[in-house]
Amino acid sequence: MSFPAVELRQVTRFHGARNTGVAALDGVSLACPAGTWTAIMGPSGSGKSTLLHCAAGLDQVTTGRVVLAGRDITTAPDGVLTEMRRRTIGFVFQNFNLIGSLTAEQNVAFPLRLAGIRASRKDVRGVLGSVGLADRATHRPRELSGGQQQRVAIARAMISRPAVLFADEPTGALDSHSAKVVLELLRDMVRGAGQSIVMVTHDPAVAASADAVVFLADGRIADRLDGPTTHQVADRLARLES
């Protein structure tokens, strides 16, 4: 894409009435270049999750504009947003959001089924193989570890080849080894497939895997690091929290 993967233009998001409510986002402008990985960090209550939800069209902004994969979705109807979620964007969350009654391969194929696309078993098994779970295709979530469930969730996001992947604390429920595997998979999506990732995390080591880290405080962008290291991220975050 020649345009940013995600762009927020002077976005505000109020919870409650405009004059008496709380501003979760206060005049945020942010452009995430296509084919890059952007991490969003900040103290508790800084607006991280609200920014992610607004950028993905899960939450409507109060003022400002949101442009996703070159399309202004600020006032897009539900039907358009639903179609974009099926074809243009993917989601990975901390709690995996797998369907317990379905096998790993059925969970991976589910978004395509919703979009009316018949996924071949070869394609589904192929994407499970790419996340190291070819031998777990017929297992249900309860038969998988947390790290394996998250890899299934990533495979589910990968199957439709989304232009933008939104990740909310994707390693938050994982042990260090599983987290490392997941981060390597996300990096491969950017480096190998040219996809874009916007990720919320509280972990400096996880954020340091991204190309850039954007820091929020009180609903505003407070800082930015390009090519971050774990030490730099931890230092900036500590300053904001103090």
Image (tube, rainbow, N blue to C red):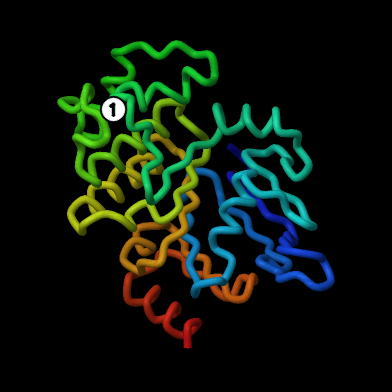
In the figure, is residue 120 to the left or right of 129? Answer: right
**Relative vertical location of residue 38 with respect to residue 239 in this rendering, above or below:** above
Please report the residue visible at 72 percent of the width from the left and 41 percent of the height from the top.
73
Please report the residue visible at 48 percent of the width from the left and 67 percent of the height from the top.
41
Please report the residue visible at 49 percent of the width from the left and 33 percent of the height from the top.
162
Location of residue 23 in the rendering, given as x and y in whole percent from the top left corner: 71, 69
Please report the residue visible at 55 percent of the width from the left and 27 percent of the height from the top.
87
In the figure, is residue 40 to the left or right of 188? Answer: right
Most foreground residue, 195 or 216 = 216
**Relative vertical location of residue 9 with respect to residue 89 in this rendering, above or below:** below
Most foreground residue, 101 or 43 = 101
User: Which quarter of the figure has residue 144?
Assistant: top left
Q: Farthest residue in the front direction?
A: 101
Location of residue 225 in the rendering, given as x and y in whole percent from the top left corner: 47, 69
The image quadrant where one finds the N terminus is: top right
Location of residue 167 in the rendering, given as x and y in whole percent from the top left corner: 45, 49
Q: Which residue is mark 1?
A: 104
Q: Looking at the picture, which amino acid does disc 1 mark?
A: Ala
User: Which quarter of the figure has residue 22?
Assistant: bottom right
Q: Farthest residue in the bottom direction?
A: 242
Location of residue 10 in the rendering, given as x and y in whole percent from the top left corner: 75, 61
In the figure, is residue 166 to the left or right of 106? Answer: right
Most foreground residue, 167 or 94 = 94
**Relative vertical location of residue 76 with respect to residue 199 in this rendering, above or below:** above
| Label 1: few (<14), some (14–19) or many (≥20) C-alpha neighbours in 10 Å | many
In the figure, is residue 58 to the left or right of 125? Answer: right
Considering the numbered disc 1 on the image, is that residue within a helix, a strand or a loop? helix
